[in-house]
Image: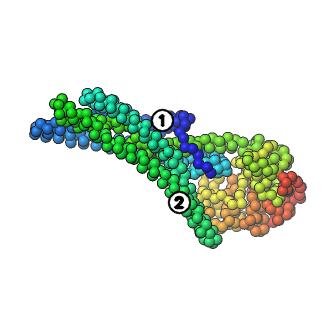
Amino acid sequence: MPDKKAAVSRETLYRLGRVVRMFLRSKTGSRARWLLAGLLTLMLMINGMNVLNSYVGRDFFSAIEARDHAGFVRQAWLYVAVFAGSTVVAVFFRFCEERLALLWREWQTQRVVRGYLDKHIYLHLKETGSITNPDQRMTEDIRALTTTSLSFLLMILNGTFTTISFSGVLWSISPILFAVAVIYAAAGSCLTFWLGRPLIQLNYQQADREADFRSELIYVHQNAEGLAFTRDESRMKDRLAARIDQLVGNFRKIISVNRNLNFFTGGYNYMIQLIPALFVAPMFIAGGVEFGVIGQSTMAFATLVGAFSLVVTQFQSISSYASVVARLSELVDASESAVVRDSKSCLDCKMDAERIIYSRLCLRASDTDERLLLENLDATFVPGRTVLVTGPNPSAKMALFRATAGLHEAGSGSIQRPPLAKMAFVLEQPYLPPGSLREVLTPPGVEPLPDATILGILDELKLEVPGSTKHDFDSQRRWDDVLNLGEGQLLAIARALLSAPEFIFLDHLESALDSDEFALVRAAISRHGASAVVFSDGRSGGNGYDAVLHIAADGSWKWEEKTAAPPAV
């Protein structure tokens, strides 16, 4: 995938401002506002302490220059008191900043994760490939966004307060020195931005390079057995080496830009210490100011220039922050597109019917692939009747399976069906989330199932899983790791039956279940009063079904009525 240009547009900044307003108006917003008010109060106290510190320092060094022992001792104690007070205020300021950043991150992450699972955004992003590494954007990028946004906001506010506080101090020493500070900071900011601008794009790319490398390592962990049995380590080593080369090469470019930037910023920061002395020392030599004014002017100049030079002092952080904002903005754009895509996924669906009716349904491979998979299907699946869907084109059958669930948008026609709560779908590779057996079997929004119900459905399907013989239904397990494919399919069917569906769609279960097991499943579905719609390669024929829908390779179809015999157990 080609690299996207990392840029922060006006729309991006508007979104960021909108997110901040939403956060402050949320349920946790009252706590956030109190913490923010505390931060502003502490910031004013810090600036007041800094101004006081500049005058105490001036008198301290003037007492040394005048050999005033009593004054020296008095100013030294005052110096210690100011440092102690500044330390206490700074510690509480940092504490409040970290608590507010954590509160914002928690709220933002919860909000993004809920949105990610809503409207099947996670599925559409995977299918379209419109966004890379969404997991990293929801973890590391949100953490960086909340922490750095708050840090920059506080730095800007603190810079404003510092400018107001120390402008008067520096102006009282030398109006010319004040003007030099402003010009010096402005020139330094412009040059820093010109030298460091490539960092924005490079930091954006580096985040993706790191995430791609981590994804490959996760893939190795998840497919350890397959990798070992196929002895494909050499190819995987080549892939990992390529990922390492990409991230190292991009990081070398970052280091090169930082080198050039540091040449300038290093000299810039050193000159800050010298410039005030060049202006004030002649005034002291001429007897116009006290000796302590030299130190005061140096502190005031450095503080004021630092307030004006946020771009110079924080450019590397700003460049990283800009890439984070751009990446999250892309995630928002992709999510909004996914919501639109999801609204079109159900082809003119009407979810208030008691049967499933396909009217002139045409299905294509995807929005970008115009291959016709199914042409003008007119068929009705009636409750209480079983249907076999077969044919030589697995893509056509999967498209119909997905379209019925409202997850395939490429096509035309209409589908009338019951609400999804009255339908169940069991995939060839079943989805079994980690958790206890009770959690896996309990339908969403239902009270945890009693032991008797769990034992009943397991006995009905003649299924034994870890913990079932000891009635251990509450131990946490990763079911994909402890069950083979056939056991996983049976457990998924058990969960589907306990949701009391009117229709249950089965996707190529013959890949892992033998004929006796499959007959057992169909008998259980019949006892639960559900209609089975079986997608199969047709090896078992159409015996035992009320109807067979055959989808040909060219997208044409044939409906055949059968006289169903009850499935034998």
Percent across and percent down for residue 480 are 62, 63
Q: Residue at x 36, y 32 (%)?
A: 183
Q: Is residue 235 left or right of residue 424?
A: left
Q: Residue at x 38, y 44 (%)?
A: 265
Disc 2: CA contacts within 10 A as few (<14), some (14-19) or many (>=20): some
Percent across and percent down for residue 544 are 84, 61
Quadrant in the picture for the C terminus: bottom right
Q: Which residue is mark 2?
A: 244
Q: Residue at x 10, y 39 (%)?
A: 67
**Three-letter amino acid code at disc 1?**
Leu
Which quadrant of the figure has residue 275? top left
Q: Which residue is nearer to you in this view: 310 or 374?
A: 310
**Three-letter amino acid code at disc 2?**
Ile
Disc 1: CA contacts within 10 A as few (<14), some (14-19) or many (>=20): some
Q: Which residue is nearer to you in this view: 209 or 153?
A: 209
Q: Which residue is nearer to you in this view: 519 or 69?
A: 69
Of discs 1 and 2, which sits in the foreground?
2
Looking at the rendered structure, the secondary structure element under dot 1 is helix
Q: Which residue is nearer to you in this view: 233 or 338?
A: 233
Percent across and percent down for residue 25 are 50, 34
Please report contact status of discs 1 and 2: CB closer than 8 Å, yes or no. no
Find the distance from the CA under tag 1 to the CA under tag 2: 41 Å
Q: Is residue 408 left or right of residue 442?
A: right
Q: Is residue 45 left or right of residue 57?
A: right
- Image mark count: 2
Q: Which residue is mark 1?
A: 24
Residue 527 in sight in this render: no
